Amino acid sequence: MSSLKEKLLEDMKKAMNEGSHVTLAAIRTTRATIKNEEISQRKDLSDEEVKKILEKEIGLRREARDEYRRLGNESQARRLEQEIEVLEKYLSPPNG
């Protein structure tokens, strides 16, 4: 079984090839956060640590989405909702 970081990299490459801009943006920013945390801690992060970062990224996007909705910017709120859906897939247990 591949690690979450490997899955994110694999899916990022796939999104690049498919031209899926929302998926690509969500994964790129999350991978950057993971890399920054690894540099900060001077170690490779485990899948559990990566899941915590994913949860934090989802939370940040939810806050931003709610703020965009409050300000009436529904298109940006929808984009963040799509990014949340992309990231939530990595927290779900694999089927099969």
Image (cartoon, rainbow, N blue to C red):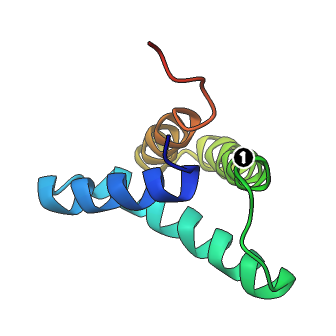
The three-letter amino acid code for the residue at tag 1 is Lys
- State how many labels appear: 1
Q: For residue 96, which quarter of the picture?
A: top left
Label 1: how many Cα within 10 Å (few below 14, some 14–19, many 20+): some
Q: Is residue 13 above or below residue 4?
A: below
Question: Which residue is located at x 44 percent, y 39 percent?
Answer: 82
Q: Is residue 52 visible?
A: yes
Side (left or right) of 82 relative to 59 = left
The extreme left residue here reads 18
Instruction: Give the residue at x 74% y 57%.
Output: 46
Q: Is residue 4 left or right of residue 53?
A: left
42 vs 22, left or right, is right
Residue 65 placement, left or right of 86: right
State the residue position of label 1.
51
Residue plotted at (48% across, 46% down): 83
Closer to the camera in the image, 71 or 49? 49
Q: Nearer the viewer, residue 83 or 37?
A: 37
- Looking at the image, the residue that sits furthest to the front is 1
Residue 26: tell me if it is visible: no
Residue 59, by quadrant, is: top right
Residue 92 position within the rendered picture, expressed as x and y whole percent measured from the top left = 60, 26
Where in the figure is residue 16, as x and y percent of width and height? 21, 63
Residue 91 is situated, as x and y percent measured from the top left of the image, at 63, 34
Residue 31 percent coordinates (x, y): 55, 67
The residue that appears at 51% across and 23% down in the rendered structure is: 94
